[in-house]
Image: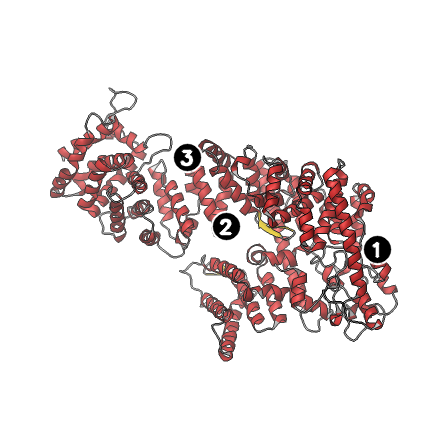
Amino acid sequence: MASLQQLLAEEGFERGHRQFTEGPKPMKLKDRTSTDHDSIALPIYICHDLKSFDFSKQRSDKAVSRPEYSIKSSEREGSNSKSSRIDGIGREEPAIDEVAVRAVISILGGYIGRYLKDEIFRESVREKFNSCLERRKRKEPDNGILANLELGVESIDKLVEGKGADREHRMKLLRNSIQLLSIVASLNSKKTRHSSTCGIPNSHLSAFAQLYLSIIYKLDKNDRISARHLLQVFCDSPYLSRTHLLPDLWEHFFLPHLLHLKVWYHKELELLSNLDYGEKDKRMKALGKAFNDRMDMGTTQFALYYKNWLKIGAQLPAVPSVPLPSRTSYGSLRRRSSDSYTSYSSQNKNLFRTVFGPTERRSMDLDHLNRASINAWNLQKEHKSKRNQKAELWSESKKSESFQLFACQSTPAEEFVVNGEHSRNNSRRNEDNNRNHTSELSRAHTTICSSDDLSECELAIRVIVKTWLNSHGDSAVEAELSKAPIIEGMLEVLFASNEDEILELAISMLAELVAKNESNRQIVLNFDPQLEIFIKLLRSTSLFLKASVLLYLLKPKAKQMISTEWVPLILRVLEFGDQIQTLFTVCCSAQVAAFYFLEQLVNGFDEDKNFENARAVVSHGGLALLLGRIEKGEIHERQNTASIIICCIQADEKCRSYLAENLNKASLLELIVLENYNCNRCAIALLTELLCLARRTQMMKFLDRLNNGWGGLSTMHIFLAYLQRASSEERPLVAAILLQLDLLGDPSNCSMYREEAVDALTSAMNCQTCSEKIQEKSARALLMLGGLFPSYIEEATSEKWLLKLAGFNEHSDDSFYGKDENLNEEEKATEIWQQKAAMALLKSGSKGFLAALANCMVNGTPSLARASLFTVAWMSRFLHSAVDENFLTTASSILVPPLLESSSYDRALEERTLASLSLERLTKT
């Protein structure tokens, strides 16, 4: 997201501390005096909670003459009237300063304006819009709501892309789009806001409509109304807007007002860390709900607050108060919720003061301006003494500071320039401050590289961060901070310090440096090759999400993640990392980081270590987290989830039953429907693994649930469509899945799906034209159709059952077992299934399928030849009931030669037994 400085510059504002190549124009003494005194970064109430600002000094100031265009007229007028005093009860609020309104409009307008200029941003919004509509239930009526929304969005995109060239056509499209989207936006009425349309919450549809209305008015250059519609997005659906739709805008515009909730949440999490699993899980869910509800409430209140700003001639509204949730709402172990509030202030006061500068109103006297740049090195003793006085700091800070909306009051104070004039005093002050910052950075460099005093090094971190933020990305400062000794010094502080404030500053600073330069990434990895520092940070209760983002930027490989601690640490990141983490200008999802680490842990080592880590994921409860992400995550997250679940199944087959029971089948089908090849491939692979259940009764239950379809589409139609566009390697398994779904019905009835599936499987069994990889897939497809499946450790259970049925025991050459009368329930279910499968294959595949089996027994790869022999063996039991006498003669002529060859004494004992059993049945038939 563009910075405040950039957004204001686009709207014609300039800032007092900026250096210009040309000298300032001469100014009259009256104008210069007024500018020095009155120019500010923004009116004070955009940076602070107005009630926390102390006007006592302002009231005592003498009135100052002002130029024709006053930046802060309402505040100065209030210095001589009761109307500006807000600490009394029942006193009139001052009118909102027009410059402040213009600043808010420029911020919001600059953000939504990205849709017109930035193709990447535009595609991102479209993807979120499409993902919302993809979840609709097509069978439910929508009264034209979704059609209106889609038509309105399509018209806007035509306007943005310039397809409506002439003015008359553009105006017509604008009017039509406004009418269509206004209908959808009306869904947020009291009667309908909690309802849904085609399965999509009305609040979501209304939020998207408001977003596109904002874009329309931006196109029409009506920035004030555009900004109001953009704020309404956060009123209609605060959770969707802040977590999915516009998270970057929310982080910059709303989060600073709600930081106390975030700090409170992490404190509460820390208190729950020592509880046993069951109680902890229950408390965390309640805590998470209370936190999100309060965040949503605060977001809505501040969105309405700023909407009121944008009313023409409006009075300044009261700043919303968003209290912490009550103890009873989440069952906290904390003594009183006010403790958390005190903890918040004590943890963050020094952080905000160091990074953004003191927030008290500075005198505009030149002597005071020169003293505004505080020498941080003189604060060391004060900092040490105040560590034990944290409870007292909040009462002081309430009067003078609350976190600003943007970093709009960092030292030195940033100011607007009236009529394009630049103050010489400001320029001189900035030059002095730049020299001070250079000197401080040099001393910080020396300290962090050589000092053994941890408190000195922690203070050096503060100075480094403050200098970096005030430099606004200056290349010289970046080059100085990118030196190996400084980066290594910050890493040592990360390892040694226990101050969350310092750790967060260091993590954010390193994230900035690593994101900007690949060599900085190598410096960090070379200094900590086994990532011991990051294991320590990931164990923390408050900073583990930010630490995971920094580690993700480093892109470590599996060989650096050997410790057994990694799996539980990463799973915790996955569980709680659903919100975007902001490390200065770096924004990243902690869950994206978690998926990267899990991928390394289960795929980056040799097979034994991969399986060990995958089993650890299962044993630590990771499957439940992964199942949640495959339902609710973004497309790439769901794809990664499917890939990791496959690894878990291969490592621990016992989890297959749990997954088959608890996986959302509709979500899996959705991944197959999406036009994303990698996503489709992972979903098919996962489904193939899940269908290898050991029990036929369990498999039938899974297939029944899968057959319910998705989004009004038939499951078999979904797989038929996918079969027609699948790659050659995928076709055998997709055909086997489609055929199994078809067999849920009556195999004696004709079926287009069955014909297509058998034809595709027969084609894939052509040994002369198909590669070894395709033949391996065909072998697995045949075993799937047999009803019981090969283990990754043992031989095929189906083969064991068939050998047992034939009277052969692999543990004893002369032992014989009973026949069909002793089959248990599962074996009977398998027998019924095989009978239906044999009938379908023989009737639909006819001679072609039998010829393919015969060819595979002779010319196929070892796995395909064995699978084909197994298939002939179980199918031979049902030939007499599946086909007529003429077809039996044909079947015998096709199958007997390869079976005789498989009966030779140079073949394995099991193969000879299967071949002999098949020959006996063919002869009897």
From the top left corner, tell me how far across and down residue 774 is, in percent: 31, 43
C-alpha distance separating marks 1 and 3: 69 Å
Can you see residue 187?
A: yes
Using the image, tell me which numbered label, if any, was put on residue 371.
1
- Please name which of the two marks, 2 or 1, marks the residue nearer to the observer: 1
Of helix, strand and loop, which one carries label 2?
loop
Residue 58 found in image quarter: bottom right
- Please name which of the two marks, 1 or 3, marks the residue nearer to the observer: 1
Of helix, strand and loop, which one carries label 3?
loop
Tell me the quarter of the image containing the C terminus.
top left
Between residue 848 and residue 281, name the one nearer to us: 848
Q: Examine the rendered structure and indicate whether residue 511 appears above or below residue 176.
A: above
Q: Is residue 276 left or right of residue 66?
A: left
C-alpha distance separating marks 2 and 3: 25 Å
Using the image, tell me which numbered label, if any, was put on residue 653.
3
Q: Is residue 825 left or right of residue 59?
A: left
User: Label 2 belongs to which residue?
Assistant: 633
Contact, mark 2 vs mark 1 (Cβ under 8 Å): no
Between residue 588 and residue 570, name the one nearer to us: 588
